[in-house]
Image (cartoon, grey):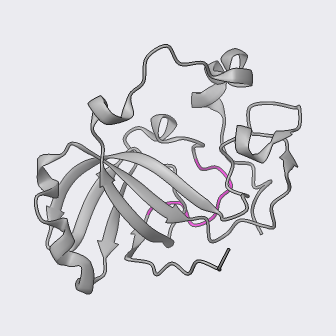
């Protein structure tokens, strides 16, 4: 397969200048605000986004170190497969976060509930639609016994360069 080259459509600005201490999921970052600066050439693509309360940001983990196929996730001491964890060190270093959209001003989106490091390159935005994105009868594997740790767990820098 050929190499895929992605072009950022913007930059995500947050209060987190380095990975250490960041909430590990948006739900644990409730109330933390930031902005998404969409590059001017892509501003027209924001038309009608104000009608959504939440958006999904797809971005590049620009500070992630080289990935390993087995890693210890934040809320566990057991090595897990990279595709069974949500850490940032991945083969393609792509992150996703569902955040609250506060408002739009031209090419700038004001957002809340963050788990993203400052200056992360934005690859795409999608509207969050519960009827499309929420599933029933979900199993969460090894996280079943660990998910209660979410709000107390922070990035300890283990996946950063």
**Res 39 quadrant in image:** bottom left
90 drawn magenta: no
Side (left or right) of 161 relative to 56: right
Residue farthest to the front?
1
User: What secondary structure prevails in the magenta region?
Assistant: loop
For the point 58% across and 77% down, which residue is it?
Answer: 4
Residue 121 seen in this snapshot? yes
Left or right side of 106 for 36: right
Name above or below for residue 38 compared with residue 35. below
Identify the residue at image location x=74%, y=23%.
Answer: 142
Write down the quadrant of residue 43 in the picture.
bottom left
Q: Position of residue 143 (x, y in %)?
A: 69, 24
Q: Position of residue 25 (x, y in %)?
A: 54, 41
Q: How many marks?
A: 0
Give the magenta-colored segment's residue range: 14-22
Q: Position of residue 61 (x, y in %)?
A: 61, 65
Quarter that holds the C terminus: bottom right
Q: Which residue is at a point 15% across and 75% down the rendered structure image?
A: 44
Location of the N terminus by quadrant is bottom right
Residue 42 falls left or right of residue 67:
left
Closest to the observer: 84 or 101?
Answer: 84
* Quarter of the rendering containing residue 54: top left
Q: Nearer the viewer, residue 139 or 35?
A: 139
Viewer-proximal residue among 25 and 1: 1
């Amino acid at each position: 397969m050929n190499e895929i080259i992605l072009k950022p459509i913007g930059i995500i600005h947050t209060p987190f200048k380095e990975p250490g201490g960041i909430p590990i999921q948006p739900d644990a970052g409730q109330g933390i605000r930031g902005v998404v600066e969409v590059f001017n050439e892509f501003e027209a693509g924001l038309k009608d986004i104000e009608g959504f309360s939440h958006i999904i940001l797809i971005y590049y983990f620009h500070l992630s170190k080289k990935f390993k196929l087995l890693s210890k996730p934040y809320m566990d001491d057991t090595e897990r497969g990279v595709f069974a964890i949500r850490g940032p060190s991945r083969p393609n270093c792509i992150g996703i976060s569902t955040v609250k959209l506060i408002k739009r001003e031209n090419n700038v989106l004001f957002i809340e509930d963050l788990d993203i490091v400052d200056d992360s390159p934005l690859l795409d935005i999608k509207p969050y639609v519960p009827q499309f994105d929420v599933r029933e009868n979900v199993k969460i594997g090894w996280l079943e016994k660990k998910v209660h740790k979410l709000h107390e767990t922070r990035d300890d820098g283990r996946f950063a360069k």
